[in-house]
Image (spheres, rainbow, N blue to C red):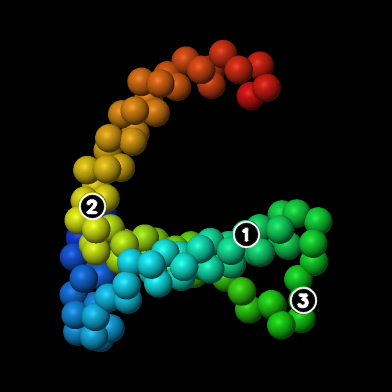
Amino acid sequence: MEYTLNSCQELVDNWIQSVGVRYFSELTNTAILMEEVGEIARIMARQYGDQSFKASEEDINLAEEMADVLFVLICLANQTGVNLEDAFRKTIEKKTERDGNRHKNNPKL
């Protein structure tokens, strides 16, 4: 099955209603989102940065942590009435218009 952002939002909402009982509050989900992003930062610092993994961190999976971030972000979108597919499309259009030549002309890149 191919997932779109719209279908992911629907899937998460159905999961919350059937398994999760109800959404956590928006504030709680924001805190959870920050925790999940922190887990990605920890992996990145150890895998690509100068820190080393602790013995207890051997089973950490970057893809799973990214999916956790996406899940909580989708929860927040559902709770606040944001259509992520529309928002993402607008962001791509904005970045394309704003940065169309900016990166091509950046000697650092």
* Residue 60 position in % (x across, y down): 61, 74
Report the residue marked by disc 1.
Answer: 41
Residue closer to the observer: 10 or 82? 82
Q: Which of disc 3 and disc 2 is earlier in sequence? A: 3
Marker disc for residue 82: 2
Label whose residue precedes the other's in the sequence (2 or 1): 1
**Discs 2, 3 touching: Cβ within 8 Å:** no
Q: Position of residue 19 (x, y in %)?
A: 25, 86
- Give the residue number, with chain letter if any, for mark 3: 54
Residue at 73% of width from left, 62% of height from top? Answer: 46
Residue appearing at x 47%, y 15% in the figure: 101
- Disc nearest the viewer among 3 and 1: 1
Left or right of 43 on screen, residue 77: left
Amino acid under disc 3: Lys
Mark 2 crowdedness (10 Å alpha carbons): few <14, some 14-19, many ≥20: some
Taking the image as shown, residue 58 lies to the left or right of residue 73, namely right
Q: Nearer the viewer, mark 2 or mark 3?
A: 2
Q: Nearer the viewer, residue 36 or 46?
A: 36
In front of the other: 32 or 59:
32
Label for residue 65? Answer: none
Query: Which residue corresponds to the image point at 53% horizontal and 68% vertical from the top-left?
Result: 35
Q: Amino acid at mark 1?
A: Ala
